[in-house]
Image: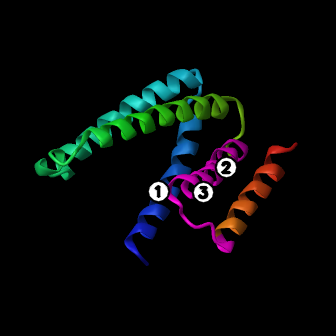
Amino acid sequence: MKPWLTYAFTAMLFAGVTTVIAKHGLNGITGEMGVVLRSLYVALFVGTFAVFFVPMGEWQTVQRENLFWLAISSFTTAVSWIYFYKALKEGDIATVTLIDKGSTVVAIVLAWLIFKEAITLRIALGAGLIIAGLLVISRR
């Protein structure tokens, strides 16, 4: 298996576990407080990761364009997390996470529009199945 596939499946596994743990952690607090606490912990863990695993020379390769686009990405991540936690607080995990994973379809379309990534039959079929799953699970 290619390393990036291993990384992607590891991310998938941890994202799934994260959601279940987060739902439990929201007991007795608001979704807003949950996302604030989670974000502080994430900053702590990522900062620690940076100290141990990002070589000093790597910091010198960062350009303004990197800072600009990653700042925008951080903003969209924050908005996503805020609304995800608000939904998770009140909704069930299966429905909330599947709707959230509809972001895959948004990413596919944006990758096609911005980066000219190909939408193959395989990708279109997978995206269609995600949309179908979204419709099935989100209806009561």
Under mark 3, the amino acid is Ile
Please give the residue where the numbered disc 1 appears in the rendered image.
Answer: 11
Q: Residue at x 65, y 54 (%)?
A: 105
Image quadrant where residue 73 sits: top left
How far separated are the C-alphas under marks 2 and 3? 10 Å
Under mark 2, the amino acid is Gly
| Label pair 1/2, CB-CB below 8 angstroms | no
Residue 134 position in % (x across, y down): 76, 51
| Label pair 1/3, CB-CB below 8 angstroms | no
Q: Is residue 3 magenta?
A: no
Looking at the picture, tell me which residue is in the foreground, 2 or 123: 123
Please give the residue where the numbered disc 2 appears in the rendered image.
Answer: 102
Image quadrant where residue 22 sits: top right
Q: Secondary structure at mark 1?
A: helix
Q: Secondary structure at mark 3?
A: helix
Q: Residue at x 69, y 45 (%)?
A: 99
Which quadrant does the C terminus fall into?
A: top right
Residue 84 position in % (x across, y down): 60, 35
